[in-house]
Amino acid sequence: MIASSIDHITSRDNPWLKRLRKLAQDGAESRRASQAWLEGDHLCRAMLARGLKPEAGVFAQSLWPQVPPELAAAAPRNVVLPDALFESVSGLPSPARMGFVIRLPQAPAVDAQAPTVILDRVQDAGNVGAILRCAAAFGFTQVMAIQGTAALWSPKVLRAGMGAHFGLRLVESVQAGALSELALPVITTSSHGGTLLHRAQLPWPCAWAFGHEGQGVGSEVSQRASLAVRIAQPGGEESLNVASAAAICLHASAAGRAG
């Protein structure tokens, strides 16, 4: 069933299109507008699979006649754009020709018992999205992003997360003091000291904290940690990318539970 409202926008200066373009290209706009832009079939279907509904569907004119019914009927409003206008919105080298505008969920309270990933000023959107994807894969259901972390609902983080957002409890822009609400042991990582990860007795449930790409975890978060670990690096590199380190650590927790 096709949505009852179908709008064709052809002007680059259309006010609604200008707002969409800003939402799709400005990483901080999602926080200000309480909306997010999902581009591409995979992200849109990941959202629908969780029972969520978009505010609007946006489709390139060349794709519109072939849009699957379940995507065309997902939103109360569909907007059809000439391909050139869709390309002006898209943040992808090869535009996906479809996307959804969604309303962000209300900010949840911290779940004191939920297995948690803490992001302490992780600034690269690709790293943040990759860590969210690892969290969802390895059984961590909550992410707490301390102020200074890349906006969790920005287009680049959403693309890197590959749909993980819709299975996670996302608590954004908190102060480090909010970690006191967790009734879980906090584990930090360091490239310089701490127990070797493969020898550590990892508690479950727990909260893993991953820090700024250059500075690591800040002192306020470190002071709340009950365990610090380091990853064995026999190859001699100075440190690992934060997303790579997160994948190793979160998998270690998952493997420990399975064992």
Image (spheres, rainbow, N blue to C red):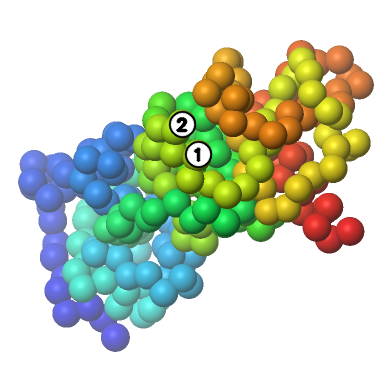
**Residue beneath the point at 13% across and 65% down:** 7
Quadrant showing the C terminus? bottom right
Residue 21 visible in the current orientation: no
Q: Position of residue 142 (x, y in %)?
A: 53, 52
Label 1: element kind: helix
Above or below 40: residue 119:
above
Q: Amino acid at mark 1?
A: Leu
Callout 1: few (<14), some (14-19), or many (20+) C-alpha neighbours within 10 Å? many
Image height check: is 237 above or below 229?
Answer: above
198 displayed left or right of 241: right
Q: Is residue 203 left or right of residue 155?
A: right
Which residue occupies the foreground of this view, 225 or 171?
225
As drawn, which residue projects farthest toward the bottom? Answer: 1
Q: Name the residue nearer the viewer: 86 or 194.
A: 194
Residue 52's disc is: none
- Tell me if residue 205 can be seen: yes
In contact (CB < 8 Å): disc 2 and disc 1: yes
Residue 79 image point, x, y percent: 20, 62
Amino acid at dot 2: Ala
Q: Which mark is residue 176?
A: 2
Q: Separation of disc 2 and disc 1 at Cα? A: 6 Å
Secondary structure of the residue carrying numbered label 2: helix
Q: Is residue 112 above or below residue 65?
A: above
Vertical comparison of 146 with 90: above or below: above
Could you tell me residue 190's position as x and y percent?
A: 72, 22
Question: Crowding at label 2, few (<14), some or many (≥20) Cα neighbours within 10 Å?
Answer: some
- Pick the quarter of the image with the N terminus: bottom left
Q: Residue 206's spot in the image, x, y percent?
A: 67, 48
Judge by depth and name the residue closer to the eye, 165 or 14: 165
Check disc 1 and report the residue beneath it. 179
Quarter of the image where one finds residue 66: bottom left
- What count of labels does the image hold? 2
